[in-house]
Image (cartoon, rainbow, N blue to C red):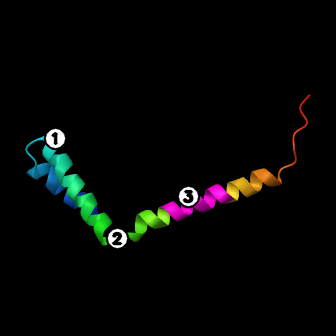
Amino acid sequence: MSALNRILQLYRTAAVTEREKGTYFERLALVYLRNDPKYPFELFQRVVTVSLETMQIVNSLPKLEID
């Protein structure tokens, strides 16, 4: 079992309500993003790169002759 799975299982066991489970998960996500702030930025960079490369490919395609 991975570390993440163990943490989530602990949350499931400790939480009394579904809302409490959600609160635990939100706190975990917040800690992760605060300690690894580069991840969202890297993901954004990849999305932008793929979009730009897609536009280059589309622009290099020959025009369609539609009558």
Location of mark 3 (residue): 47
Q: Which residue occupies 17% across, 53% down?
A: 24
Report, in whole angstroms, how far the alpha carbon at label 1 lies from the one at label 3.
33 Å
Of helix, strand and loop, which one carries label 2? loop
Left or right of 46 on screen, residue 8 = left
Location of mark 1 (residue): 18
> Looking at this view, is 57 or 13 the one in front?
57
Of helix, strand and loop, which one carries label 3? helix
User: Up-down: is 37 above or below 26?
Assistant: below
- Position of residue 1 measured from the top left corner of the image (x, y, whole percent): 27, 61
User: Up-down: is 54 above or below 39?
Assistant: above
- Position of residue 23 measured from the top left corner of the image (x, y, whole percent): 18, 50
Is residue 4 located in the magenta-colored stretch of the structure?
no
Mark 2 or mark 3, which is nearer the start of the sequence?
2
Of helix, strand and loop, which one carries label 1? helix
Specify the amino acid type for callout 1.
Glu
Seen as rendered, the residue at the extreme top is 67
Mark 1 or mark 2, which is nearer the start of the sequence?
1
> Looking at this view, is 18 or 37 the one in front?
37
> Looking at this view, is 1 or 49 the one in front?
49
- Position of residue 16 measured from the top left corner of the image (x, y, whole percent): 7, 44
Tell me the number on the disc at residue 36. 2
Left or right of 8 on screen, residue 59 = right
